[in-house]
Image: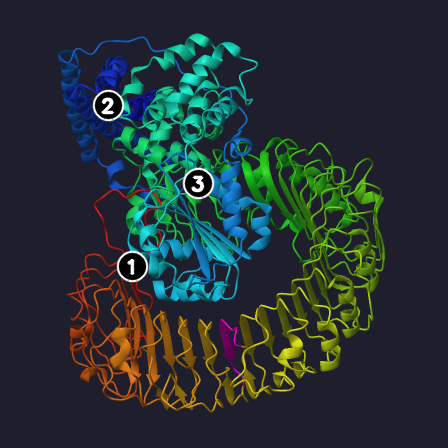
C-alpha cells in the first residue's frame, strides 16, 4: 500500500519540480542545484517501487524502508509547496494595480526574510542526507528495477444489481412479506413486531431487506419508513437521529438523547411505520430497550426489520428459534454469477466457460456478495485461459474456510494501481458511512491521487471515471435510502482497512460543528487543499483563509449566518470547487472571482456582473445567476459563454425590481444568449423573466438529459414554451404567470407529449382559463397539483391512466369534475377551497381512491362519498361549514372500511354518533379518530351509555386525540382504546372507561385540562379513579397542567410502564415513591414543578433501569435531598430549579451526580453563582448544558476529558452559547463526529 501512495505522491512531486514558477523561485533563492540533485535521487528510488511493493508483504525491512520513504516524500512535498506559495506571493506583488505594501502585510515573514532562505537550505540539506541513506539502504535490500506496464481502466459496464437482486430469493421474499404485511401479533405486548433476518456476512441480508423495503405493497402499507445502517457501533443517539431525519426530512439538532427521542416519539405517534435496522452487532438488551422507546408510540402493526449476524440479542428478545438466511442453491448461484460475469443468466452463449463457472461458484459457497464481486471481476475477462489462471491462484488457500475473503483479495489484486490507491483511501470511512460521489472525488483530488491524469482529461472527470469503475466492480454500492449516495459493504470496508496503512491527509472538515468563528490557525495550514465548513454557524471567512494558495475545494453550504467573504478571495488561484448552497445571508461575492480560472463548480453567482463568468472555462455542475434584470446589454450575456460550459444545473433569476431599462425584448435577447450546453443540462430554473415569449432553446428536444424544469414569476409571458418534447423531463413546475390564458398545443409540441413526466405542478396562474391536451399526452404522470388558478374552468384532457395523486386548491369546480373523469387510477385526492357552494361531484369513476382530504369545501360535497365509500380508508375534513350531526351521521353509514378520520375546525358538529352501539354497525374498521378545534363539540356519543359495566362495541377503535375542543365536558372512552390524548380542552370535567376496561391502553396524555375534576391518578381500594389496575399494558403516561390533581396512588401494577412525565401540577401532594423500585420497565422519568409534593420525595428510591431523569421544582429543596443512590443505568440528568431552591455553589449538589452521566443539564437555579467545582467526578460526561441561571459567573477552569459540548443560555454573566471542542491527537475516521 505504501508503494501506491508513494507512486501517486512522487508523480505530484515531479510535476512540481518541473513547474516554471518553481524553477524561477529556486534560481532566485540559489537552491536550483539542490533540487536537481533531489530529483535524480527520487528517479532512482521510483524505479524500484514495483519490486518493493511485491516484497513488503513478506519482508518487514522493505516495509519499513517504504514507510520511511513515505514520510520523507511528504516532507519534500511540503518544501515544494512552501516554495510555490512564495512564488505566488511574488507574482501577486508584481500584478498591476497591486499595492506592494498591502501584499507585504499579508506575506508571512518566512517568504521575505534572509534567515528563512537559510533555513530552506538547511531543510534541503537534511532531506538530501536522509534520501541518500534510503538510496544506500535500497541497494542493501536488493531492490531492483521491474518493467511496469501502465494500467488502464476497463470500459464501465452497466450495473445489474437491481435486476439480479431477486435471484434465488423468491421464496424468502414471499415469506418475509407475509411477516411484514400480516396482522399484528396480538400476543405481543408492543405496537411493533420485530422481523429478524439472520445470516452470515455476504449471504444477502441487506439485499433481501432492500427488496422488501422497496416493494410497492410495503410502501403503500406503511405511513412512515426509515432505513438505518447500524454497524458495529450501536449509538442510540445516531440511530435515533437518522430515523428522525428519515421520517421528518428535517436535519434538526437536539440538546440530548431524551429530547431527540421525545421528538421522535411524537412523530411516530399513532403512525404505522417500518424501520430497518441494518447490520446490528450489539448484543446489549439495555441498549435495545432504550432505542425502541419511541417505537412504542406507533400504530399496532408497525414493523422493525433487523438484519444481523448475531443471535444473542434476538434470544433476549424472545426469538428462541432462529431461521438463518440460507446460502443460494447451486443453480441460483450459477445464474447470479453468470448475470455479473456475462450479462445473461446462463452460459448458453459461452459453453466452454460453464465448467469453470461451476468451479468458481463452488468456491463462493453460495454467498451472493462473493458471486457478485467475482462475477464483476471476470466481466472483463472472457478468455478461458484467464478463468483457468484465476481458478489456480494461491489466494484461494488464504480464506481458512471463509469463502468470501479470497474473492475480495482476488478482486482487489485485479485493480489497477490507481484504483487500489483510491479504494484504500476509503478505509478512512467508518462502516456504513454514506458518502457522496462528488465529495469523494474532491477528496481524492485533495490528496493528489489524480494528478497524473490531468493531461488527458480534468482531474475531476478522471476521478469520476475511477469511481464508476469501482462501483461497477461492486466495491461501492448505492445507499439504501438515496440512490444518489453510496456505501461500502462492511466486509469491503475491512478489506480497505487491511490494505490501507497510514495516510497523510491534506483535508480538513469541520462540517456540522457548532462553531461561530473559523479558527485562526486554519490560515496557516498552507498545504491544505480541501476545507469543509458546511452547516456551521460562522458569520464570515477571515482574510487569512486567502493564504491557502493550495486550496482546491471550499465548502460553506448551509452556513445560514454567513454574511461576508474575504476581500482577497481572488488570491485562491488553485480553487476549483466553491459550494455555498443554502448560505442565504450572503448578498454578494468579492470582486475578482472571475480571475479564478481553475474554478469548476460555483453554486451561486451572487452580486457579480455576468461577465465574470467569461474566463471560467472549466465551470460545470450547478450555477445560480441572480440579478439578470441589471444586465443592460445582451452581449454581456454572450460573454458568459454558457453553451461551452458543461453545466448540469442552472438557475436564471431576473429579480423582482423593475428598472427603467428592463424591456421584454432585451430580456429575451439576454435569455437567448444564456443558452446552456444541451448535452449536460439536467435541471433548469427561470424566475422573474419579463419577456413576452421564450427563445426557441427553452424546450428544445436536444436537451436530452433535462429532467427538472421550473418557470416561475414570468408575469409578462402570454404563452408557455414548448416543453412537451423534452424526452427525459420528469418534473415540471409552472407558477406566477398571470397573463397566460390558454395552455394547449404550444406547450405540448408535435408528437407524443411529455413521454417521461411524472410530477406536474401549476401555481398562481390567475389569468389561466383553458387547458387542453392531445391524445396520449402524459403517459406516465403520477402526481398533479393545481393551486390558486381561480379562473381555470375549461379542462379538456385525455385519459391519465397512471395518475395517483391529485391536489386542487382554489380552482374552479369544473377542474375537479373534468379531472376526476379522466383519472380512474387515483388513490389520493385533496380538495382545498374549491367553490364552497358546490353541492355534488361524482366520484364514481375512482374505484382505487384510498385517501380523501376536504378543506373549506361545501358540505354538499360529502354526498360524493357514497360513490367511493367502499374504498376510502382515510378521511380528513377541515373547516367545512354546514357539517351538522345529522349530515355527518348520514355520511358515516357509507364508511364501512374507513380506518382513520380527522375532523378539524368544523364548528357545527356536536356529536359523532347517536350511541357507540349504533356507530359500531357502520364504523366497523375505525382505528383512529382525531378532533381538533371543533368549538361546539360536546361528546363522542349523543346518548352516553352507562359504560361502568359494559364493554365497548367499537372493537377496532385504538386511538383518540381531542385538541382544543372547548365545549367538550365528558369523554367516555371505548374499551378497545390503546392511545388516548386529550389536550387543551377548557371545559372537560371527566374521563371514563368501562369498569375493568382500558386493558389495552398503552399511552395516556392529558395536557392543559384545567377543569378536569378527577383528583387522583392510580388505583385505590373502593375509589373510582382515572387509571385502574386493569390497565396493566400502560407504557406511557404524560400529565401536565392538571391543577386539580392531588394524588398519584398505587403504580406498581403497571409493569410495562417505561415513561412517566408529570409537570405543572401544583396541587399534587401524594406520590408513591416507595413503589418506584418495582417499576422495572421504567427508563424515562420526569417530575417537575409540583410544588406541593410530599417533602419525603425524593428519598433515594428509583427504578432499576432508569436512563433519563428530569426532576426539580418540588416542595423539598434540592439542598435537602441527600444522597440519592441513582442506578448505574442513569446517563441523562436534568436538574430543574424551583422557588424553594437556594443553592449558590454547584459543589453543594455534587453528591447527587452519578459518575455514569454522559449528559447533564442545570436549569432555572436563580441563586446559583458558581459552577467552578462539583463536576470532577463526571469522567464520562460528554455534554453539559446550563441555562436560565442569571447569577452564575464562572465555570471550571479545566473541562472534563470526554466533554464534547458545553452550551450556555440565559446566563447574562457568561458568554452566550460557548462551545468547547476537545482537541485530539488521534486521526479520526471521516464522518466519525457529527456534533460538537
Residue at disc 1, secondary structure: helix
Mark toward the start of the polypeptide (1 vs 2): 2
Residue 884 shows which numbered tag?
none
Q: Nearer the viewer, residue 1 or 561?
A: 1
Q: Is residue 977 magenta?
A: yes
For the N terminus, the quadrant is: top left
Query: Residue, x 53% and y 60% (percent of image)?
Result: 272
Residue at disc 2, secondary structure: loop
Residue 1106, compared with residue 349, is above or below; it is: below
Residue at disc 3, secondary structure: helix
Badge 2, how many Cα within 10 Å: few under 14, some, many 20+? few
- When asked about the image quadrant of residue 727, the answer is top right
Residue 143, compared with residue 695, is above or below; it is: above
Query: Residue, x 39% and y 34% (percent of image)?
Result: 202
The reply to whether discs 1 and 2 touch (Cβ–Cβ < 8 Å) is: no
The reply to whether discs 2 and 3 touch (Cβ–Cβ < 8 Å) is: no
From the viewer's perspective, tell me whether residue 244 is left or right of residue 684. Answer: left
Q: Which residue is mark 1?
A: 286
Please count the marks in the image. 3
Badge 3, how many Cα within 10 Å: few under 14, some, many 20+? many
Q: Which residue is mark 2?
A: 30
Query: Residue, x 32% and y 50% (percent of image)?
Result: 1233
Q: Nearer the viewer, residue 784 or 886?
A: 886
For the C terminus, the quadrant is: bottom left
Task: Nearest to the eye among marks 2 and 3: give it.
Answer: 3
- In this view of the protein, can residue 112 be seen by the observer? no
Q: Which residue is mark 3?
A: 206
Mark toward the start of the polypeptide (1 vs 3): 3
Q: Position of residue 919 (x, y in %)?
A: 66, 76
Residue range highlighted in magenta: 975-985
Amino acid at each position: 500500500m505504501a508503494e501506491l501512495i508513494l507512486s501517486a505522491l512522487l508523480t505530484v512531486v515531479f510535476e512540481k519540480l518541473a513547474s516554471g514558477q518553481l524553477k524561477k523561485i529556486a534560481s532566485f533563492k540559489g537552491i536550483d542545484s539542490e533540487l536537481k540533485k533531489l530529483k535524480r535521487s527520487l528517479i532512482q528510488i521510483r524505479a524500484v517501487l514495483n519490486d518493493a511493493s511485491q516484497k513488503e508483504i513478506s519482508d518487514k525491512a522493505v516495509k519499513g524502508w517504504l514507510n520511511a520513504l513515505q514520510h520523507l516524500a511528504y516532507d519534500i512535498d511540503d518544501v515544494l509547496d512552501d516554495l510555490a506559495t512564495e512564488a505566488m506571493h511574488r507574482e501577486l506583488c508584481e500584478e498591476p494595480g497591486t499595492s506592494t505594501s498591502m501584499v507585504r502585510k499579508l506575506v508571512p515573514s518566512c517568504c521575505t526574510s534572509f534567515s528563512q532562505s537559510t533555513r530552506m537550505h538547511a531543510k534541503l540539506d537534511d532531506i538530501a542526507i536522509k534520501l541518500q541513506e534510503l538510496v544506500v539502504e535500497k541497494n542493501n535490500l536488493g531492490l531492483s528495477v521491474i518493467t511496469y506496464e501502465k494500467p488502464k481502466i476497463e470500459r464501465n459496464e452497466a450495473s445489474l444489481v437491481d435486476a439480479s437482486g431477486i435471484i434465488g430469493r423468491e421464496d424468502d421474499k414471499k415469506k418475509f412479506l407475509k411477516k411484514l404485511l400480516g396482522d399484528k401479533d396480538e400476543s405481543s405486548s408492543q405496537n411493533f413486531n420485530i422481523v429478524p433476518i439472520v445470516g452470515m456476512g455476504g449471504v444477502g441480508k441487506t439485499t433481501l431487506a432492500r427488496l422488501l423495503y422497496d416493494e410497492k405493497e410495503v410502501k403503500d402499507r406503511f405511513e412512515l419508513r426509515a432505513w438505518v445502517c447500524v454497524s458495529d457501533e450501536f449509538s442510540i443517539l445516531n440511530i435515533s437521529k437518522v430515523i428522525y431525519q428519515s421520517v421528518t426530512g428535517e436535519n434538526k439538532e437536539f440538546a440530548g438523547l431524551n429530547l431527540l427521542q421525545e421528538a421522535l416519539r411524537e412523530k411516530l405517534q399513532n403512525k404505522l411505520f417500518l424501520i430497518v435496522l441494518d447490520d446490528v452487532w450489539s448484543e446489549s438488551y439495555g441498549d435495545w430497550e432504550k432505542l425502541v422507546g419511541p417505537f412504542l408510540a406507533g400504530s399496532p402493526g408497525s414493523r422493525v426489520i433487523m438484519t444481523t449476524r448475531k443471535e444473542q440479542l434476538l434470544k433476549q428478545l424472545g426469538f428462541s428459534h432462529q431461521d438463518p438466511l440460507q446460502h443460494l442453491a447451486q443453480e441460483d448461484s450459477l445464474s447470479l454469477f453468470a448475470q455479473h460475469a456475462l450479462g445473461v443468466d446462463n452460459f448458453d452463449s459461452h459453453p466452454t466457460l460453464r465448467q469453470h463457472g461451476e468451479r468458481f461458484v463452488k468456491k463462493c459457497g453460495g454467498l451472493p456478495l462473493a458471486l457478485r464481486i467475482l462475477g464483476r471481476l471476470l466481466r472483463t475477462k472472457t478468455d478461458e485461459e484467464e478463468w483457468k489462471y484465476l481458478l489456480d491462484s494461491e489466494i484461494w488457500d488464504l480464506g481458512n474456510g471463509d469463502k468470501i475473503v479470497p474473492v475480495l483479495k482476488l478482486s482487489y489484486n485485479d485493480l489497477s494501481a490507481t484504483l487500489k490507491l483510491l479504494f484504500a483511501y476509503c478505509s478512512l470511512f467508518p462502516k456504513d458511512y454514506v458518502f457522496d460521489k462528488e465529495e469523494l472525488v474532491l477528496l481524492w483530488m485533495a490528496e493528489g491521487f489524480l494528478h497524473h491524469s490531468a493531461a488527458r482529461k480534468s482531474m475531476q472527470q478522471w476521478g469520476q471515471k475511477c469511481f464508476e469503475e469501482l462501483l461497477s466492480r461492486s466495491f461501492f454500492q448505492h445507499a439504501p435510502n438515496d440512490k444518489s449516495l453510496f456505501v461500502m459493504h462492511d466486509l469491503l470496508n475491512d478489506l480497505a482497512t487491511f490494505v490501507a496503512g497510514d495516510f497523510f491527509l491534506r483535508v480538513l472538515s469541520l462540517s456540522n460543528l457548532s462553531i461561530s468563528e473559523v479558527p485562526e490557525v486554519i490560515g496557516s495550514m498552507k498545504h491544505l487543499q480541501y476545507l469543509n465548513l458546511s452547516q456551521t454557524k460562522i458569520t464570515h471567512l477571515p482574510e487569512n483563509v486567502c493564504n491557502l494558495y493550495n486550496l482546491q475545494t471550499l465548502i460553506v453550504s448551509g452556513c445560514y449566518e454567513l454574511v461576508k467573504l474575504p476581500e482577497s478571495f481572488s488570491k485562491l488561484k488553485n480553487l476549483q470547487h466553491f459550494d455555498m448552497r443554502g448560505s442565504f445571508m450572503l448578498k454578494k461575492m468579492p470582486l475578482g472571482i472571475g480571475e479564478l480560472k481553475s474554478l469548476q463548480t460555483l453554486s451561486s453567482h451572487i452580486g457579480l456582473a455576468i461577465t465574470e463568468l467569461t474566463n471560467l472555462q472549466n465551470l460545470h455542475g450547478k450555477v445560480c445567476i441572480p440579478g439578470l434584470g441589471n444586465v443592460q446589454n445582451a452581449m454581456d450575456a454572450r460573454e458568459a459563454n454558457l453553451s461551452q460550459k458543461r453545466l448540469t444545473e442552472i438557475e436564471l433569476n431576473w429579480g423582482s425590481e423593475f428598472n427603467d431599462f428592463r424591456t421584454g425584448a432585451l430580456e429575451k435577447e439576454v435569455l437567448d444568449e444564456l443558452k446552456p450546453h444541451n448535452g449536460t443540462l439536467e435541471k433548469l430554473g427561470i424566475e422573474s423573466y419579463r419577456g413576452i415569449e421564450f427563445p426557441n432553446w427553452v424546450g428544445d428536444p436536444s436537451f436530452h438529459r433535462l429532467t427538472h424544469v421550473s418557470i416561475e414569476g414570468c408575469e409578462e409571458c402570454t404563452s408557455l414554451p414548448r416543453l412537451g418534447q423534452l424526452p427525459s423531463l420528469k418534473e415540471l413546475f409552472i407558477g406566477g404567470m398571470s397573463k397566460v390564458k390558454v395552455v394547449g398545443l404550444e406547450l405540448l409540441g408535435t408528437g407524443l407529449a411529455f413521454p417521461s413526466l411524472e410530477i406536474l405542478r401549476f401555481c398562481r396562474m390567475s389569468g389561466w382559463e383553458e387547458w387542453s391536451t392531445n391524445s396520449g399526452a402524459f403517459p406516465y404522470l403520477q402526481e398533479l397539483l393545481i393551486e390558486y388558478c381561480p379562473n381555470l374552468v375549461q379542462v379538456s384532457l385525455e385519459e391519465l391512466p397512471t395518475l395517483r395523486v391529485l391536489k386542487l386548491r382554489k380552482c374552479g369546480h369544473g377542474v375537479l369534475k373534468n379531472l376526476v373523469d379522466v383519472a380512474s387510477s387515483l388513490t389520493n385526492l385533496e380538495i382545498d377551497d374549491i367553490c364552497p357552494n358546490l353541492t355534488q361531484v361524482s366520484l364514481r369513476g375512482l374505484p382505487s381512491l384510498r385517501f380523501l382530504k376536504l378543506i373549506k369545501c361545501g358540505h354538499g360535497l360529502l354526498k360524493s362519498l357514497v360513490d367511493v365509500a367502499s374504498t376510502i380508508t382515510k378521511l380528513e375534513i377541515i373547516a367545512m361549514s354546514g357539517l351538522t350531526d345529522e349530515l355527518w351521521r348520514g355520511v358515516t353509514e357509507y364508511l364501512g372500511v374507513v380506518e382513520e378520520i380527522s375532523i378539524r375546525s368544523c364548528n357545527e358538529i356536536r356529536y359523532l354518533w347517536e350511541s357507540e352501539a349504533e356507530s359500531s354497525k357502520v364504523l366497523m374498521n375505525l382505528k383512529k379518530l382525531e378532533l381538533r378545534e371543533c368549538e361546539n363539540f360536546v361528546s363522542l356519543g349523543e346518548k352516553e351509555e352507562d359504560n361502568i359495566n359494559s364493554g365497548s362495541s367499537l372493537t377496532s377503535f385504538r386511538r383518540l386525540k381531542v385538541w382544543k375542543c372547548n365545549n367538550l365536558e365528558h369523554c367516555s372512552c371505548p374499551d378497545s382504546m390503546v392511545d388516548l390524548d386529550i389536550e387543551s380542552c377548557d371545559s372537560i370535567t371527566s374521563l371514563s372507561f368501562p369498569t375493568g376496561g382500558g386493558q389495552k391502553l398503552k399511552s395516556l396524555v392529558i395536557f392543559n385540562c384545567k377543569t378536569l375534576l378527577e383528583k387522583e391518578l392510580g388505583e385505590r381500594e373502593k375509589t373510582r379513579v382515572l387509571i385502574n389496575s386493569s390497565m396493566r399494558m400502560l407504557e406511557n403516561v404524560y400529565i401536565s397542567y392538571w391543577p386539580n390533581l392531588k394524588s398519584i396512588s398505587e403504580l406498581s401494577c403497571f409493569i410495562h410502564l417505561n415513561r412517566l412525565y408529570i409537570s405543572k401540577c401544583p396541587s399534587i401532594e401524594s406520590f408513591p415513591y416507595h413503589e418506584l423500585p418495582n417499576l422495572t420497565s421504567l427508563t424515562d422519568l420526569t417530575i417537575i414543578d409540583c410544588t406541593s409534593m410530599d417533602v419525603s420525595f425524593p428519598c433515594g428510591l428509583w427504578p432499576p433501569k432508569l436512563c433519563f431523569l428530569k426532576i426539580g421544582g418540588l416542595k423539598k429543596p434540592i439542598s435537602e435531598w441527600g444522597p440519592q443512590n441513582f442506578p448505574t443505568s442513569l446517563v441523562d440528568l436534568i436538574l430543574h430549579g424551583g422557588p424553594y431552591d437556594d443553592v449558590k455553589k454547584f459543589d453543594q449538589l455534587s453528591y447527587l451526580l452519578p459518575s455514569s452521566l454522559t449528559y447533564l443539564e442545570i436549569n432555572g437555579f436563580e441563586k446559583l453563582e458558581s459552577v467552578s467545582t462539583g463536576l470532577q467526578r463526571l469522567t464520562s460526561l460528554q455534554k453539559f448544558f446550563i441555562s436560565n441561571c442569571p447569577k452564575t459567573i464562572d465555570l471550571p477552569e479545566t473541562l472534563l476529558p470526554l466533554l464534547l459540548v458545553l452550551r450556555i443560555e440565559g446566563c447574562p454573566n457568561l458568554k452566550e452559547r460557548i462551545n468547547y471542542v476537545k482537541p485530539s491527537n488521534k486521526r479520526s475516521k471521516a464522518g466519525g463526529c457529527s456534533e460538537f
